[in-house]
């Protein structure tokens, strides 16, 4: 798709498909801005067109450089059909409800990213296992080496897709209601912040006595971060 504007070196190309049409001040094609949203949440939604019909599936993703990865069952018809398919992957984070003096001016604070590219299946078992290792280590640093090693059958039963980001847009709203001209109207207005964080760990049933929560996981919970 042809560029509408010459991209900056650190920006994705601005095209008819990816350009921000409304609230331009909230949008960005900068790689750093797109990466910041992708890296802030493990949950994404991937849009495909399969047999002429649109489908959107939720999954967990991870990023390495200018590529995003996601995984699922090798038996999934979506993943089996996704090879060489154009896809749209989106992430969104709700940061707060914005309450204004009128219903019309209510809004939300959010961060979002929409990235486009072509899905590729990782066929090599060693490459696939390495990608899955990065996925686990990105979420839980140091955990992979403590786990039972993956079996060949488990690697075979898992599909991993990789997509080079060809176009992308990030969009962010962060601030109070935009109705300061109505500040004299006698109703409360402001922001109700929304936060996602890790809660205390819950041990699996049957966990043998003496197996304590690893220190890195305890520190992760203490930090509250989910990614």
Image (cartoon, grey):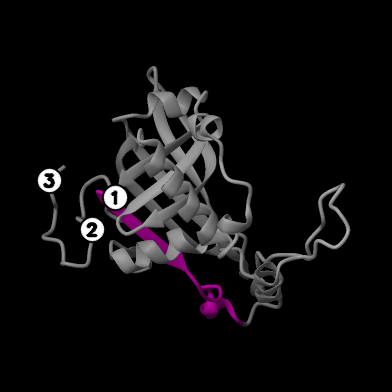
C-alpha separation, residue under disc 3 versus residue under disc 2: 12 Å
* Residue displayed at 28% across by 30% down: 84
- What residue is disc 2 on? 12
Q: Quadrant of the C terminus?
A: bottom right
Sequence-wise, which precedes: disc 1 or disc 2?
2
- Quick check: is 93 in the magenta stretch? no
Q: Is residue 26 above or below residue 88?
A: below
* Residue displayed at 36% across by 57% down: 64
Label disc, if present, on residue 2 of the rendered structure = 3
Label disc, if present, on residue 165 of the rendered structure = 1
Contact between labelled residues 2 and 1, with CB atoms less than 8 Å apart: yes
**Residue 32's x, y, as percent?**
33, 68
Sequence-wise, which precedes: disc 3 or disc 2?
3
- Quick check: is 167 in the magenta stretch? yes
The residue furthest top is: 51
Question: What is the crowding at mark 3: few (fewer than 14 residues within 10 Å), some, or many (at least 20)?
Answer: few
Q: Nearer the viewer, residue 119 or 184?
A: 119
Query: In this image, 15 relative to 201: left or right?
Result: left
Magenta segment boundaries in residue numbering: 165-183
């Amino acid at each position: 798709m042809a560029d509408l504007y010459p991209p900056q070196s650190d920006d994705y190309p601005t095209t008819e498909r990816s350009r921000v049409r409304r609230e331009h001040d909230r949008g960005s094609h900068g790689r750093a801005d797109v990466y910041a949203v992708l890296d802030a949440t493990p949950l994404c939604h991937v849009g495909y067109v399969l047999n002429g019909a649109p489908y959107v599936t939720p999954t967990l993703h991870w990023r390495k450089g200018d590529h995003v990865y996601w995984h699922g069952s090798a038996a999934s018809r979506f993943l089996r059909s996704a090879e060489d398919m154009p896809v749209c992957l989106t992430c969104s984070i709700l940061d707060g409800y914005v309450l204004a003096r009128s219903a019309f001016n209510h809004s939300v604070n959010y961060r979002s990213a929409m990235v486009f590219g072509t899905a590729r299946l990782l066929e090599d078992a060693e490459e696939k296992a390495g990608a899955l290792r990065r996925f686990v280590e990105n979420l839980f640093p140091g955990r992979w080496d403590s786990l039972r090693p993956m079996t060949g059958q488990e690697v075979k039963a898992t599909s991993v897709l990789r997509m080079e980001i060809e176009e992308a847009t990030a969009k962010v709203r962060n601030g109070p209601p935009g109705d300061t001209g109505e500040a004299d109207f006698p109703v409360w207005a402001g922001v109700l912040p929304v936060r996602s964080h890790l809660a205390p760990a819950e041990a699996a049933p049957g966990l043998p006595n003496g197996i304590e929560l690893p220190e890195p996981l305890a520190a992760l919970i203490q930090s509250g971060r989910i990614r």
